[in-house]
Image: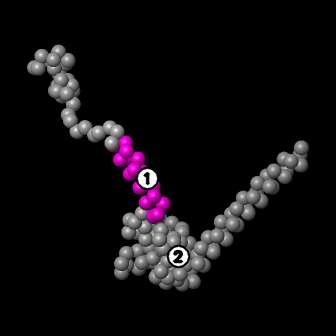
């Protein structure tokens, strides 16, 4: 029983160190794979293109003709060219196109079943809600 109490916290600590080490290794691998022309997302959520890579810093083109210097640690993710293009230019990815087409089909069938009515509410209900009229005033037309 005492052995279990001692081994359980040690096992938890070892698992935490292992997952942290894997995360650091993947972050290091991502930072070494940076190359000019790649689309990236910073930890602040800004999307940019890599212009040049130095030992500890990178130059990012955040807008046409606007270059900013960042540390490599400020890069949260390196994006695929198609994903970067979809985010920057507002083009949907292939998965989103398929979802949009299926939702349009279901919406068109639903709209055929029940037509949309743009008519206003009946006059007696409008009189009750407008001007604070009572039901009796609405019925008599006052």
Residue 132 visible in the shown view: no
Q: Residue at x 84, y 52 (%)?
A: 7
Measured as percent of width and height from the top left, residue 82 is found at 47, 71
Does residue 39 appear left or right of residue 107 in this picture?
Answer: right
Residue 37 falls inside the magenta stretch: no
Q: CA distance from mark 2 to mark 1?
A: 43 Å
- For the question of whether residue 3 can be seen, the reply is yes
Q: Quadrant of residue 61?
A: bottom left
In the figure, 55 relative to 15: above or below?
A: below
**Residue depicted at x 89% and y 44%:** 1
Q: Residue at x 20, y 35 (%)?
A: 119
Classify residue 112 as left or right of residue 103: left
First to last magenta residue range: 93-111
> Looking at the image, is 125 positioned above or below residue 101?
above
Q: Residues within 10 Å of mark 1 (few under 14, many from 20)?
A: few
**Residue assigned mark 1:** 102
Q: Nearer the viewer, residue 80 or 41?
A: 80
* Predominant SS of the magenta segment: helix
Q: Secondary structure at mark 2?
A: strand
Q: Residue, x 49% and y 77% (percent of image)?
A: 38
**Secondary structure under badge 1?**
helix
Earlier in the chain: of badge 2 and badge 1, it is 2
Q: Quadrant of residue 32?
A: bottom right
Mark 2, residue position? 71
């Amino acid at each position: 029983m005492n052995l279990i109490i001692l081994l359980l916290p040690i096992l938890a600590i070892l698992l935490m160190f292992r997952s942290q080490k894997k995360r650091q290794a993947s972050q290091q691998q991502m930072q070494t794979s940076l190359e000019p022309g790649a689309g990236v997302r910073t930890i602040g959520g800004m999307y940019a293109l890599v212009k040049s890579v130095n030992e500890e810093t990178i130059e990012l083109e955040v807008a046409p003709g606007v270059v900013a210097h960042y540390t490599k640690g400020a890069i949260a993710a390196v994006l695929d060219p198609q994903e970067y293009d979809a985010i920057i230019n507002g083009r949907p990815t292939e998965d989103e196109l398929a979802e949009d087409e299926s939702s349009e089909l279901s919406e068109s069938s639903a709209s055929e079943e029940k037509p949309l009515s743009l008519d206003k509410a009946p006059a007696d209900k409008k009189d009750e809600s407008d001007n604070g009229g009572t039901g009796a005033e609405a019925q008599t037309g006052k």
